[in-house]
Amino acid sequence: MARINLLNWREEKRKQIEQQFYGMLAGAAIAGVAVILAVQMQLGAMIEHQESRNSYLKTEIKKVEKAIAEIKALEKEKADLLARMNVIQELQGNRSDSVHMLDELVKVLPEGVHLTKFKQKIKSLTFDGIAQSNARVSAYMRNIERAEWLKAPNLKVIQSKKKGTDGGYSQFTLTSQQGNPVEKKKNTKKSKG
């Protein structure tokens, strides 16, 4: 009978399995490294793509912010121009008010009353004058009360002065407000409506 030594065969088989194991282990390590490198490269490409998108968005945001600043400047300029236009329209609308008021001032002045000084501050009027009597000053105030372009007379000072044998005269200071019948009509329409 022939003698077969099975020990060497088993050892060779074990070495072969061991080499296969180390080969598979090396292959798995290489595959793992390759997967990690592939994932890392993919993530790097995605990050680079996102960074380029972010830089594009930043440049576009800067453009939009610049446009917003220009729009705000234009809106401010527009508001300034509208304010100027409103002032001009108001001035043009009130241009004839002074003429009407001065015309009314002459109409309401009764006989025997003379104005020596007239001062206007915005819509406030101050009259200094002389009258033959206090009754003439009272008549002047009643005329102002009825006038369309004058309103709210208020007597500040009245002094009686003696003037020789003819009698005396009265010096007065009177304040009033400039009225506007157009505004008055608008206000009455609003209150009725």
Image (cartoon, grey):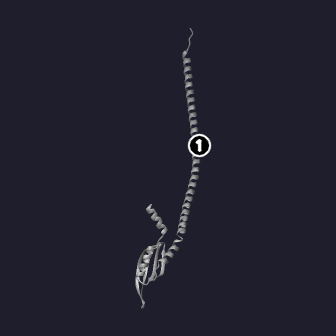
Front residue of this view, candidates 82 and 10: 82
Rendered position, 155 above or below 33: below
Quarter of the image where one finds residue 2? top right
From the viewer's perspective, is 82 left or right of 166?
right
Query: Outermost residue toward the bottom?
Result: 165
Q: Position of residue 54 (x, y in %)?
A: 57, 46
Tell me the quarter of the picture where residue 80 sits. bottom right
Question: Split into 4 quadrants, where in the image is the N terminus?
Answer: top right
Mark 1 lies on residue = 49
The x and y percentages for residue 187 are 46, 65
Q: Residue furthest top?
A: 1
Residue 92: where, in percent of width, then height? 55, 68
Q: Count the marks: how many?
A: 1
Q: Relative to 161, is 13 above or below? A: above
Look at 46% across and 75% down and name the residue there: 125
Q: Secondary structure at mark 1?
A: helix
In percent of width and height, residue 18 lies at 55, 24
Looking at the picture, does residue 75 appear above or below residue 138? above
Q: Amino acid at mark 1?
A: His
